[in-house]
Image: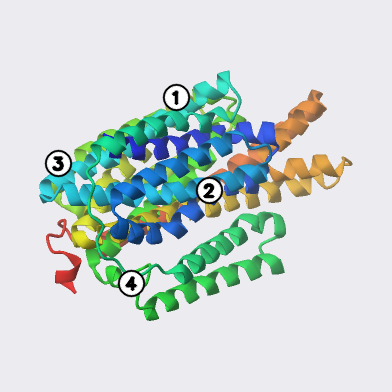
């Protein structure tokens, strides 16, 4: 229960935030790039610290990491709720990432150490993944209700009581697992991983504003790639690496981690786009948007619960590959949505997305855990979770940037010949919410024309981004088909090296 609640609160937080993005545009006047950073600041810190957190959990014990992570996550949630500017919110979200990095590997490590039987572990992982899906389902509805009744900070403040209950229950219920002798911390690797991923994302997210050919964009992308390369080189030579590259010599670990990362890339990017589409373009309230998105999460939960049965009959490889193929079909279909799509146009597309991700998560995660010795459960689980967070942050960054580039390129030539204040011009080009706010002030035929042009540009950019997401999902399906073993591995990593 405690492990599920710990995971539930992180799942709720991410989906609540997606529903709140349009509200943040209206109330905090955030641009599209700032929205991306509000989402990705958490993911970048989460991903950069996961491996060190997993190593530390192996050293001091998973229970201590779980309790400490809950405290930091709850404190970060309170800080987010009281933020007064986009920059303050971005900083608070980054602080929350520290807590999330401590929670995720701790939950998987406890599962691995408590459930030794492979079938019991597979069922536990199925419940774990299903709980994640439940959080995704609850988040949009709860967030929509809160936004309809309270201010935007309530979507973060709601985490605090859940964290408090989980904290108290965790102290008394979770067994105290002895810390194992682990390698020394790798601060150089930690700094390089955060710096490399953060710089790369900065280049991707800011490219639509700075220009893809601008020196700052090219420099950031090149610097990010160089730092990531330096990180890999350091980990190869370091005698106590935060990322044990030997893990990726195991087909099950490598194939499952990469496939899952690409699946999350597609899903995270799609949800970032679709919550704005549902509210800004189709005019739904925050609560109705949450209800419309809920089928994705409900089907994800059901598919995740069924995947344990399916994997025993058809194996991990066809299930993961087939699930990613379903995701790709769903994204391609969603790319065809227009300015006046009805609910039935959305419903079956959302079902495909949820079903595909639900089929991928449990067998891929169990393939990772089954390929690792229990003594390395913490850092191994953290390595897999890092891949997931990197996939998610890149999904929001890349697909969001594709949307922004197409959106601004469609509108910029049209408004270039019209006299307007620079502030209004910047608001129109920075986000759809800004353009609609300008259109509302303009009123009349001019305002209506601007709103339609902005909606059309957004839908065009969303379509392009979702097609790219579908290609990424197909790439994940190919990786799973070629690399992932058909059956969940029975040997540990140490036995396979």
Q: Is residue 27 left or right of residue 117?
A: right
Q: Which residue is drawn at 56% across and 68% down?
A: 224
How far from the left and from the top, in percent, is residue 493?
19, 67
Verify CB contact (< 8 Å) between mark 2 and mark 4.
no
* N-terminal label among 2 and 1: 2
Examine the image and state in which quarter residue 6 appears: top left
Seen in the picture, residue 263 relative to 48 is either above or below; the reply is above
How far from the left and from the top, in percent, is residue 391?
43, 55
Q: In this view, does 490 lie to the left or right of 361?
A: left
Q: SS at mark 2?
A: helix
Is label 2 or label 4 in front?
2
Q: Name the residue under label 4.
A: 245
Q: Name the residue under label 2.
A: 95
Q: SS at mark 4?
A: helix
For this rendering, which residue is in front, 29 or 264? 29
* N-terminal label among 1 and 3: 1
Q: Which residue is drawn at 25% across and 46% down?
A: 362
* N-terminal label among 3 and 2: 2
Q: Which residue is drawn at 48% across and 71% down?
A: 188
Query: Distance from label 3 to label 4 (Cα)?
Result: 32 Å
Query: Distance from label 3 to label 2 (Cα)?
Result: 39 Å
* N-terminal label among 4 and 1: 4
Residue 309: assigned label: 3
Examine the image and state in which quarter residue 30 appears: top right
Q: In this view, does 192 lie to the left or right of 351?
A: right
Q: Mark 1 points at which residue?
A: 291
Query: Distance from label 4 to label 1 (Cα)?
Result: 42 Å
Q: SS at mark 3?
A: helix
């Amino acid at each position: 229960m405690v492990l599920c609640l710990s995971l539930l609160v992180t799942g709720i937080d991410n989906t609540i935030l997606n529903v709140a993005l349009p509200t943040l545009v209206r109330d905090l006047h955030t641009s599209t790039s700032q929205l991306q950073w509000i989402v990705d600041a958490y993911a970048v810190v989460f991903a950069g610290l996961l491996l060190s957190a997993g190593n530390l959990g192996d050293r001091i014990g998973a229970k201590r990491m779980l309790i400490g992570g809950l405290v930091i996550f709850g404190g970060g949630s309170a800080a987010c709720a009281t933020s007064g500017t986009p920059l303050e919110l971005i900083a608070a979200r980054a602080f929350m990432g520290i807590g999330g990095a401590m929670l995720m590997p701790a939950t998987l490590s406890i599962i691995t150490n408590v459930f030794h039987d492979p079938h019991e572990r597979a069922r536990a992982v199925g419940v774990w993944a299903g709980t994640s899906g439940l959080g995704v389902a609850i988040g949009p509805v709860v967030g929509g209700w809160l936004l309809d009744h309270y201010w935007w900070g309530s979507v973060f403040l709601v985490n605090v009581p859940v964290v408090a209950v989980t904290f108290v229950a965790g102290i008394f219920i979770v067994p105290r697992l002895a810390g194992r002798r682990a390698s020394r911390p790798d601060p150089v690797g930690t700094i390089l991983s955060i710096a490399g991923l953060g710089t790369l994302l900065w280049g991707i997210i800011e490219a639509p504003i700075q220009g893809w050919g601008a020196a700052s964009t090219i420099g950031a992308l090149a610097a990010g790639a160089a730092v990531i390369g330096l990180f890999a080189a350091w980990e190869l030579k370091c005698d106590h690496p935060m990322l044990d590259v030997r893990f990726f010599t195991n087909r099950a670990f490598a194939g499952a981690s990469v496939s899952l990362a690409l699946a999350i890339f597609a899903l995270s990017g799609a949800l970032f786009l679709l919550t704005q589409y549902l509210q800004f373009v189709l005019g739904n309230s925050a609560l109705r948007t949450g209800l419309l998105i809920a089928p994705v999460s409900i089907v994800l939960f059901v598919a995740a619960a069924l995947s344990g049965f399916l994997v025993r009959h058809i194996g991990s490889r066809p299930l993961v590959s087939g699930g990613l193929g379903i995701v790709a079909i769903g994204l391609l279909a969603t790319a065809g949505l227009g300015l006046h799509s009805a609910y039935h146009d959305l419903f079956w597309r959302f079902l495909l997305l949820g079903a595909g991700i639900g089929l991928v998560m449990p067998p891929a995660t169990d393939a990772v855990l089954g390929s690792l010795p229990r003594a390395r459960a913490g850092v191994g689980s953290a390595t897999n979770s890092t891949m997931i967070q990197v996939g998610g942050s890149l999904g929001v960054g890349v697909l969001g940037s594709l949307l922004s580039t197409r959106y601004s390129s469609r509108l910029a030539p049209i408004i270039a010949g019209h006299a307007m204040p620079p502030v209004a011009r910047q608001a129109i080009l920075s986000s759809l919410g800004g353009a609609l706010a300008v259109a509302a002030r303009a009123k009349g035929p001019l305002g209506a024309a601007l709103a339609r042009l902005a909606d059309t540009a957004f839908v065009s950019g969303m379509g392009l981004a979702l097609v790219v997401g579908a290609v990424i999902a197909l790439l994940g399906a190919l990786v799973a088909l070629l690399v992932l073993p058909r059956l969940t591995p029975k040997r540990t990593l140490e036995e396979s090296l």
